Amino acid sequence: MDWKTFQALLSGVNKYSTAFGRVWLSVVFVFRVMVYVVAAERVWGDEQKDFDCNTKQPGCANVCYDHFFPISHIRLWALQLIFISCPSFMVVMHVAYRDDRERKYKIKNPDSVKLYANTGKKHGGLWWTYLVSLFAKTGIEVAFLYILHHIYNSFYLPRLVKCSGAPCPNLVDCYIGHPTEKKVFTYFMVGASGLCIVLNICEIIYLISKRVARIGNKFKRRHRRTAVRQEDYNSKEPFNNCHLAVPSRDRKDRPPSFKSAFKSSHGVSSLIMEEKIRASAPNLSSS
């Protein structure tokens, strides 16, 4: 397998990823692909050749090996690395589709505005594609861990296995080559897979919480604009301000209203009338 091509393809996803996605990509390259290429392939090597049974019966070693190792660890990990990378290519393909659509739109409408401000920004359909790819990667990781545990009944590799299937003449002891080394690499790869699952879950939570926060901020801004418009409407409508208290300094500057002018004129006329009545009335006190 050409791992350089694989690395070049996955590197294109890096510029569209979040911080968690970049850490995930580093873990995949450093702790999984590099370990797989440099060390794991050499440790496993020709497994069937290193699988020794204490019998010379033809075909017995092959049957026992096939029973205990229906699929090799190294080939299962290669499939796992390929499958977990496929959802990331969905994001690259979606961005390529956006670029192509933007290019065709620019040819048809050269003077118009762009369809996308940034084709790699995770908004709209690209956000959903990215989120679905994270769920797919997490599901694939969990599925392969389950397959590995189900096939070998655990992640532990024993030194000795016993086989009694035909054409073996009786219960045969078979020995696995490099059992401790293989056990260490198995635990390491399982741990790296678990770390990738944790990173995927963290990225899913980050994306969803960021989207919820953006929707909440948008709702608050819309509510604030509605409140400002309502205040402007109330300030422009003269009949809606009759219940508001007016400061005394503003009251002096304003011209008198009809009600206040009527009250003041009525008060002055009543005082004049009272003085005339007193002047024309006889002095009762002197009599």
Image (cartoon, rainbow, N blue to C red):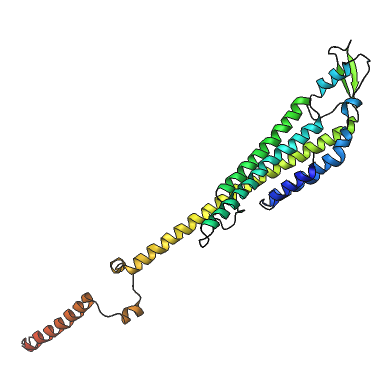
Marker count (numbered)? 0
State the image coordinates of residue 119 (x, y, percent, origin top left): 60, 54
Relative side of 242 to 10, left or right: left
State the image coordinates of residue 154 (x, y, percent, origin top left): 78, 28
Q: Nearer the viewer, residue 257 or 91?
A: 91
Image quarter (top left, top right, bottom left or bottom right) of the N terminus: top right
Residue 83's quadrant in the figure? top right
Q: As drawn, which residue projects farthest toward the front?
A: 107
In the rendered view, tell whether residue 69 sits above or below residue 267.
above
Does the rendering let one see residue 122? no
Relative side of 152 to 112, left or right: right
Does the rendering let one see residue 178? yes
Relative side of 241 to 10, left or right: left
Residue 175's quadrant in the figure? top right
State the image coordinates of residue 164 (x, y, percent, origin top left): 85, 13
Going 35% across and 80% down the picture, which residue do you hit? 249
Going 64% across and 42% down the picture, which residue do you hit? 133
Going 21% across and 76% down the picture, which residue do you hit? 258
Image quarter (top left, top right, bottom left or bottom right) of the C terminus: bottom left
Relative side of 62 to 275, left or right: right
Q: Nearer the viewer, residue 119 or 5?
A: 5
In the rendered view, tell whether residue 172 sits above or below residue 243.
above
State the image coordinates of residue 192 (x, y, percent, origin top left): 77, 40
Q: Nearer the viewer, residue 255 or 125?
A: 125
Residue 35's quadrant in the figure? top right
In the rendered view, tell whether residue 168 sits above or below residue 232.
above
In the rendered view, tell whether residue 70 sits above or below residue 40.
above
